Every structure is written in structure tokens, then in C-alpha cells.
Amino acid sequence: MKPGEVRILVLRSAGTNCDAETASAIAELGARAEVVHVNRFIRGRRSLEEFHGMVLPGGFSYGDRIRSGAVLAKLLSHRLRRELQRFVDEGRPILGICNGFQVLVESGLLPFGEVGQVKLALAKNASARFEARWVYLLKCSATPFTGKLPRVSRMPVANAEGRVVFPPGEEQSLLEELEESSQIVLRYCTREGEPARGDYPANPCGSFADIAGLASPEGTILGMMPHPERAFYRYMYPDWTRDSALGMGDGCAIFEGMLEHILKSQG
Amino acid sequence: MKWEVRVAYKRGVQDPEGETTLEALRMLGFKGVKRVSTAKLFVIEGECTREEVERMCRRLLANPVSQDYEIRRLAP
Amino acid sequence: MLALSLEEMRAIQRYYRSLNREPTDVELETFAQTWSEHCVHKTFKGIIIYDGEEIDGLLKSTIARVTRELSPEWCFSVFEDNAGIVDFEGDYAIAFKVETHNHPSAIEPFGGAATGVGGVIRDILGVWGEPIANTDVLCFGELDYPYEKLPRDMKHPRFIFTYVVAGIGSYGNNMGIPTVNGAIFFDEGYVGNPLVYCGTVGIVKKSRYRREAKPGDVLLLVGGRTGRDGIHGVTFASAELEEGAEETFGTAVQIGDPIEEEKIKRAILKVREAELGSAITDLGGGGLSSAVGEQAHRFGCGARVHLERVPLKYAGMKPWEIWISESQERMLLIVPPSKLERVLEIFEEEEVEATAIGELIPERRLEVYYGDERVADLSMEFLFHGLPRVRRAASWSPPELSEPHFEAGNLGEDLHRLLAMPNIASKESVIRTYDHEVKAMTVLKPLQGEACDGPGDAAVLKPLRESWRGIAISNGLNPLYGKIDPYWMAASAIDEAVRNNLAVGGRRIALLDNFCWGNPEKPENLGGLVRAAKACYDIALAYETPFISGKDSLYNESPLGAVTPTLLISALGIVPDVRRAVSMDFKRRGSCIYILGETRPELGGSHYYKLKGYLGRSVPKVEPSRAKRTFAALTRAIDSGLVLACHDLSEGGLGVALAEMCFSGNVGARVELSLVPAPQEMRADFILFSESNSRFLVEVHPEKAQEFEALMQGTSFARIGETLGRELVVTHNGRELLREHIAELKRSWQSGVVL
């Protein structure tokens, strides 16, 4: 299979708003990215079978009414349940960015890849505000998406509900379980790569255990609050004028990893 | 039938909007305020039973990890 | 409530007498909307007697005249559409519009500000543009304004500030349009009259720009349903705010739904790409009554509308309410009948309601039906040409002011206090609640520097994936100078907007004007307005920066009096290659620091005087010929890659600009004030804090100093110091005036405004 034959779905709904730049990032790497409205799948006009991978981009799906990502998540997990479970079970990669991460959590795809089994929440940021800022991310385990990512990387977050919450009382046991299976992929850290330890603004959302990104046990589903498509090129960095090297940014690695995984697994 | 569903953070889950409101109220001179918590209220009208409203809560209105819900019948 | 003047009522009376019938309520409302200050700009288009001089149309004899006289070939559409449009690259053009949403924001700040953003985004959609960035400039009363001084029913500046910011963030963030630029200004004159300027930039494809409707074309109402929201918003915007306004105008505040607008945007862009529409406009002030009439007028025909077809939020609305409702998230498309079916399909795909509500007709009449009943039948001729021109008296005399006399104090302490003044202090806590990067086009962000927290002069965007060409967006606003002389306020605002743009590498600059003033029926208010408009003509013409669009919001009055007269100038420049864009933070140690431009004892209206409790009278002036030489030389230096950092000098002058460049770059500096080019002997503190226009600070690598100096020949400039260490040290004739650690300066700067 050639990179040009890889078909990636960028799934949108009402209120999705990062689809264009996300599709553009994928296209820059030579794959085919198609932005399709979820209604096309619900109405049976398109099928998830057509795609080798899927990205749930950022935005405010259905206005984030009720909770961030909740409405789209429930549509997916109730109206497209079988198709989606097959997509997951076949190991086709799914990347959820920001609102897409929220959708993955609310649909149950994260952390255990089980549609309908909600085990986490992404709650209002501890600052009670929308937070738009660049953060440092510590890579804690390698997944198909993060193989090429440096140990400490930079990307921006922009969200109001990015605080990872574990079930009260089960925090430690779930954390250990996820750590054991290398599912905690990205944590907020300092510039030097030290864990943020909950400190604001290094951990901008007040996420439990500094969690910024989580993967499914197999590593083929990744949800992350930071936006790799906004760190795709160096000129997107907030301080690129201090640095003459203008090439690819850290965000590029996430998409590259996804495409390489598809090429490898499709043979 | 008319139902009221109240969705609030579970005990032990931080409620940042409540905390910010508490701070703001104190700043405005309401020194006696000790705690503020926020909740979301849905009023649901139509032909639905309590069991259905329960299912709505579990399926969409509340996140089982971070939120509790309370259902109240308003009318009739 | 109809806000028509006696003379206007009489003209209407004569019209109906000639027809021998009584007006209907729908017709009267149509006049009230179409003839409102908000829709026709009576003051700017009327006759003004200014201290004996007759001005026949202030707009066309000042602001629009600049563009007419310059007539640059790169202006694609000016003063005609909802937004000004200039060429960008190939088929692509850039549309820019800035609006105000002041009165609604005073009453319900969250909803008022959010719908202000939503409204100006629709102005861009209304020129077939794809919105790509927002800019928002806000003016509030000082945040520590005593509660006990507030009149009953008036909201505290802190409350208005908090919720206006939340409203702006909410709409832009939810719609996925980055808020890339802005300013916040605090002054007592805004306590009763907060100002909310909302601007949007969009991409237009010239080959897809359609303005060719003709009789028979269908009027298609798209978007949200119509309710009682905003009934009488236009007449409300043209009336003064009185106590109890909240009750009278409760319905005038609208609720916004950015997700609906996002869907509309997608559908409209599809209609644009398929070239299915023949015209488009937004539904703003006056709702259908303004939009339908104006479109029919524009295409030299009439219109027939069936109000019973308009989808409503709830039953029981009267025809006149439907006709003038200002419910948000609605647009009017005009579509040839043969294309209607395809257009309806597109809207259905995006889950947006679209309803054919009437058509254009060859007769120049506006016919409105509700079922079988004809509820309005008006001659277009009278509706658009029957409005008696207003004649207004204007006069201006300089206020009695004097220069203060005081001794210079501890300049280090003064610098700290200046940095913490709310108008100068960091707005980071606000900026971080706005998504300024969605769309991944923001190349130069509002926060810059080593720790990504320094104050950028202008935002630079890279709108096209396939091109390095960019745009720079900046603004200028100097309300304090207007208290001395509105002429120099306007001149300074243009200079500030232009120099902010140039500082990042922008050029070929187009301007927008936005006047917020008190009641223009008071001659002294209007006199100041005339002076400001005259400066717009003089300075913009000299700078060769045409105005492409503008807006005025008059009648900003409250129980506390008129608003501080305020002119916002927004600037849109071109950056030929965004990789050459320049940020304001010092980049390294051992660089040369240059100041460009002349420093004069111009501290009237400065923040240094304000800090000392004075206004003064020596307001900064503009010398266009001198300034243009500086501007051209700076652009050459940037294009030659000689400029490591560049920052414009504005509030707080040289001292504040230096401190900002230092702590943003985490690099100290040493500067000698006697080297600063000044035409006359000046006190050291005045050199440090004068706000003279047309000045920049530039960082240059020592190896490039010679080349840089050669380029600057023929301009006023000087090398005044170098970057080093972690302290800012300022000397005058070798004597040390201040030595401050940059981390401490930054702390002061970051303490001033907290959301």
C-alpha cells in the first residue's frame, strides 16, 4: 500500500471546527483525508468500512451542550455501535483531539475500547476557564501515534473542559491499572520535562495525574487534549521568531505515526 | 408528564464554577457564604416514565464517573 | 416606540397625505428602521455647519474621500458592502469589518458581546467571505470604580468586563474563529457607556463574489428561527440610555448561538463554491425590514415578501414584529429560481432551515403580505430617498488646559507603576480565554517572546495553505488624547494602527474607522467628531492608507454623561512572506538597540501624566512626511532581514516599550537617554515617557549595524544602547536613572489586570 492510498476519515458534526486544519495536516503527509458529517454514516450513505483510520477533530460538537462531546459520543455509541466496534476491533487507529478526546471518553472507547462503557470524565478546567496556551508534554509510553514524538514535546491546548477525572475513590486503582498497561501516553510537564504535579499552568486543566493523553490497551486509540495539528509546522509555534529553524513541529509526529501504523498493518 | 432532572458533580469531584462563584460572592461582600456548588437542571416534558428518565440520565444527561443525578416529578 | 424626529414624521405624513390613506404599523416600523441613525448614518451623510463652514456629507468629504483620491487598484470593494475588501493573492481577497455592540453589552454584557461577535462574522459571510479571525477592542470603566458612585441599574465595570470577555470568547471559540488581536482600555468615561468593538477578517474569492440579483430571484431566509429578540434594537442603538432602560429595552438584547452560525457558514460557503446565489446579505439591525429593502434598492428593483412563511420560534407574533425582529444567526440569500432546489438541499445537509419568503419584482415597490392581507406597500423611491437630510450645527473650541509642573521622582518606581496601569498592563488573563490559534493560521500570536507572554504589536496570519503571503492585523486607540484635541487623537490612532502593523512587517495598509461618540445633536459633541474626521482625511491621505469600511455609533450617553469620544482605527496590512515577520521580544544579548523617530515633549494625555494625576495639553502630533520616511526605511530593514525585534512606542513611551522588549525576551538592556533624537532639550523623565508618535525600538545584530544605519539614512534615528544582562539600566549623560531587574518589571506588568 502506498501512502496516497491511505484513507483517513475526519469525522465532523454540527459544531466541529478543527476539521479543515486536521485534514490538511494529514494531506500534507501524502494520505487522503476526507471530512465527512456523522449524519452521512447514520443515514447509511457512507460507511466506516471505507476508511483505514479515523480522526475526531476539535471543536464544540453540538455546542458541547450537556457535556463536552457527550451528544456526538452517544450518537456514535448508539447509532453506529456495531460499525464502530468493528472498526476498533480490527485495530484501525482512531485519534481524538480535544473535543475528539472528550467524545472518545464519553463513548467508552477510552480507556478500554468498549463502546458504551464510560469509565472517565473530562470535566470543567480547575481554573473554571477556557485555557488557550502552549504546554510541554512528557511521553510516558510508546503507541503507534507517539513512536516518533520526542520525550518532551510542545503543543497548544485550547479548551474549557479538559480536566481528566477518575471515579472518586477508585483513582489510585484505575491509575495503576492504566499505568500497568501503558495507557497513560502523555502527561503535562515543565519545560525541563519534570512532571507538572498538578501545578497550574503547566497542567492547565487540573487533570488528574497530569494526564494529557490516554490510549486504549492496544494503543490504537489515542485521545489527547493538546492540538497536534496546531503544532504541525514550526511557524505555528508561539516563539518561532526566536529560532531560525523552520521545519516540522512536534504535532507532525502524531499524524506520521498514525499513517505509518496503517501502512505497516495493511502490509 | 413533566420531570425535572438535576445533574451535579459527585462528592469528591472539584466544582470549579462553584469555587469561582464562592470567591466572587465573598469579594462582593457576602462574607457568610461557605460553599457554592453548581448543578444543571433539565425540565423534560412528554409521555415518559420515570424509568425512561432514568435511562436518559444514564445514557446522556449525566456522566456516571463525575456526576450524580436526581429526578423529580413536577406534574402531574 | 419609534425613534423618528419631528421632521421625519412630517415627511411621512406628507407622503401618506398624497396617497390619501393611513400608514400601516408595518410601514411605520419600516421607516423607523430604514431611517434610523444605525442604518443610514444620518449624521455622517447629512449637512453639518461647523463653525461657519458647511460640510455636505462628512463621510464623503473626509473618510471616503481619502480612498477616492488615492483610488488604489488593490481595493476590491469599499464602503459598499457589509465589509471592505482588498486584494490578497491571485483570486483571493481579504474582507475586514469592525462593528460596535455597545448598548446591548451595557445591559446584558455576555449576550451583548457574544451577539456583537456573531453579527460582525455575518458581515463577512454577507460578502461571501469565509471568516478566519476576530479582533476585539473593549473599553470599560476602571475596575476599582467605587460601587457607591454607580447609579441605580448600572452594572459595575468589573461585572461588565468579566462578562463581555466571556461573551466574546464564547462566540469566537465555539464557532472556531480565532481571536487574534485586540485591546482593552479603561477610563471613567466608559462606566456608563462601555464600548465593545468586534471585528472579523475573512477570505473572499473574487471569482465567486456574486452581486447580480434581478427581478424573479427568490428571497431565501436561512438560519435560526425568528422571535421577538432584539425588537427595536436599531432604534435602541440610536437612543440614549436612561435609567430604567433595562425594562424598556429588555427585548432588545439577543441571545447568540454560535453553533447555528457555524452551520450557516458551511452552507453558505458551499453555495458560494457552486455559484448558486445571486446576492447575499446579513440580517442585522432592522432585521428583514432593512435587509430586504436594501437589497431590492441595490439591484434597482422592488420586493414582495410573505411574512407568514417566516419560521417562528413561537406562535402569536404580529406581522410587524416578524418584519423587524433581530433574531440572531439569520442571513438573506437571493437565489435564481433555477438554483433554488440545489440551494435548499445544501442547507438541509447542514441541518439549517432555509425558507423562500418572497421574490424580487420589477416594480420599484416594497410589498409585504401576511397571508392574503397586504400589510405594507411602499414606494422604494420614497423609502430610500424621502428621508429629509439632517442639518446639524457643530462647533469645537479647545478646552482650557495647562501643562503641569512637577519634579521628576524615582523613575524606577514610576516605571513599575506605569507598567501596572490597567491600560498598559498585561491582558494575558483575558487573551488566554480566547482561542487565538484555531484554524492553525496564526503565525504571530498576541502573546510573544521567550515565555510566550509578551505583548505583540499586531497579529500575523497565513490564510492560504499554499502560500507564504500573510496579513497583519493591528489597531490604534488613544481616547485620552481626545480629551485635549480629537484631531490629534484621530491622527495618533491612525499612526498607532499603522506603526503596529509596520512593526511586524506589514505594508500596503488599509484602514477601518469606528467612531463612538455622544449625542451628535449637541454641537460640541459633533464639533469634536468633525475634527476627528478631518484628521482622518489629512493623515490617512498623507500615509496613503485608504479607508475601506467604517462604522459610527453615536448617542452613547448614560446618566453619567456622554462616552469619552473614542475613535478606533483598525489596520490590515500585507506581509509578503510570513517567515520574515518580526516579533517584539529582544532575541539575544549584545545586540544594538535603535530608536527610530523623533521624541518631543509631548506628554499631554500621556500615561505618565495620568500617573501623576494630570492631563496636560501638549498632545502628541503627527508629522506625516517625516514619519513616512521612517516607515519606509523600517520596512526596507525588515525585508533585508536586519531586524531581530521591533516594538512600537505607545502608552508609557520609550520606558514601557523597552521594559516590555526586555522581559518578553528575558534579556536586559542598557540605554543612554541623551542619545535619543529630540529637536529640543528635554527632561530625562520626559524623554523616557513622552508618547510622541511614529517611533519604534529596533534590535539589530552588531554585525548588521552598519548595514542597518545605511538603510536608515535620511531619517531621525539613533543607536541608544545594547542588550545585556538581566537588568534594565537607563542613564542620562552617564548618570544612572534607573536599574530594575526585568523579572520584577514583568511582575508589575502582570499584576495590573486580572480577569
Image: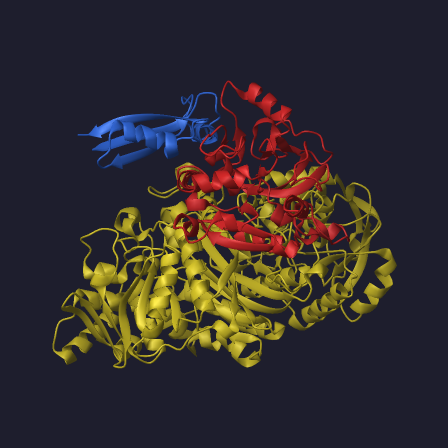
Chain colours: A red, B blue, C yellow
Camera-side residue of C433 and C517: C433
Q: Is A115 drawn above or below residue C193 in the view shown?
A: above
Q: Quadrant of residue C271?
A: bottom left
Camera-side residue of C710 and C118: C118
Q: Is residue A256 left or right of residue A172?
A: right
Q: Is residue C751 left or right of residue C257?
A: right
Point out residue C353 in the picture as x, y percentages from the top left corner. Answer: 32, 57
Q: Is C691 drawn above or below residue A136 in the view shown?
A: below
Q: In this view, does C540 lie to the left or right of A121?
A: right
Camera-side residue of C423 and B56: B56
The residue depicted at 54 percent of the width and 44 percent of the height is C430
Q: In which quarter of the image is residue C395?
A: bottom left
Camera-side residue of C448 and C244: C448
* Viewport quadrant of the N terminus of chain C: bottom left
The residue depicted at 25 percent of the width and 55 percent of the height is C312
Point out residue C585 in the picture as x, y percentages from the top left corner. Answer: 72, 50
Point out residue C23 in the picture as x, y percentages from the top left corner. Answer: 16, 70
